[in-house]
Image (cartoon, helix red, strand yellow):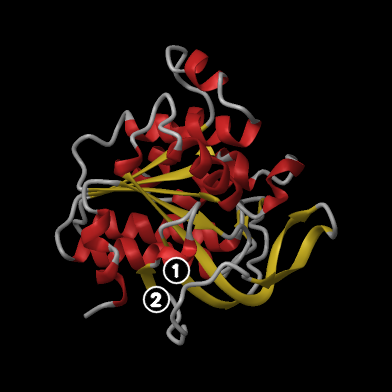
Amino acid sequence: MSNFEAVMPEAHGKFLMIDESHGTREGPEALYRYVCNLTSRGEKVIVGLEIEAHQDDTLQRGFQSEDPVEVWGEGLWIFDTQLSSFGDGRGSCAMMSLLLRFRDLQRAGADLEVRAVAGDSDSVASPRIAALPDMQSRRFAYDAYNLLQVSDDYEHVIFYAGGLHARRAGAQVDEDGPLFDRSRYLRLAPVIDGGFAQNCTLGHGCGTNPIERSTLRPSKVLNEHYEVGMDADMGPYFDGYIYLGETTASPRYLFTAGLSSCR
């Protein structure tokens, strides 16, 4: 049995939120392995990424282009070195590699769609979302709503975003909020044994920063990297876990004068 079979049946037909560890190599690798395992079984999968929804056209052009690195490196804000807000780790080499590997899966015939879903792109939903109690809850709600609008035909709907979204969204969804049915949601938290990430934090600024060992952990002893499972000990905000072990920092992606900083 693969690592992922403990979650796949539970996630079928539901909205699976995987907490991203911005700026690590292991976070995007875990997502890729899960998606690759699903598509290799013929499942229809859609993945929503924390990239601004109004940039989805640029994301799709990259998937269709013979030179996706140039399209994404020059066109996606997460890779724009002039926008300091994207030093949070979303624009890492590991994220560029993830996009390229998703493109490879598509070209190999996988039934996989990848969409940029971050931000408010629907004025009808906005008043309902605006009533949520804090900014992180509202950000999650906008992102989730955008993804749900394009996911009806898919067997697996995956939203990959920062963990603060998941924690705040957990409280809101569990209270049967205005947009979401709790029975449709599963949330996986990364379990980390310490390490490093390339990101921006209040305590350390932007750069290679330490990550503390996860205090929220499943009941079982974890030994195999990228193991996933459902576990009540991960509650109340999460339904299960994905084990990343000790993380390594993925440097910020740079695209300058047609040259990529990542190899």
In the rendered view, would you say 246 is above or below 257?
below
Residue 67 position within the rendered picture, expressed as x and y whole percent measured from the top left: 44, 50
Q: Residue furthest left?
A: 42
Q: Is mark 2 on a helix, strand or loop?
A: loop
Q: Which residue is drawn at 52% across and 24% down?
A: 120
Q: In which quarter of the image is residue 209?
A: bottom right
In the rendered view, would you say 133 is above or below 183?
above
Q: In the visual, does 8 lie left or right of 103?
A: left
| Cα distance in 3D space between marks 2 and 1 | 6 Å
Which quarter of the rendered picture does the N terminus lie within?
A: bottom left
Q: In the visual, does 132 lie left or right of 101?
A: right
In the rendered view, would you say 132 is above or below 214?
above
Residue 242 is labelled as 1
Q: In the visual, does 119 lie left or right of 201?
A: left
| Residue 62 appears in the rendering | yes
Residue 45 position within the rendered picture, expressed as x and y whole percent measured from the top left: 26, 50
Q: Which residue is drawn at 30% across and 70% down?
A: 4
Residue underneath mark 2: 227
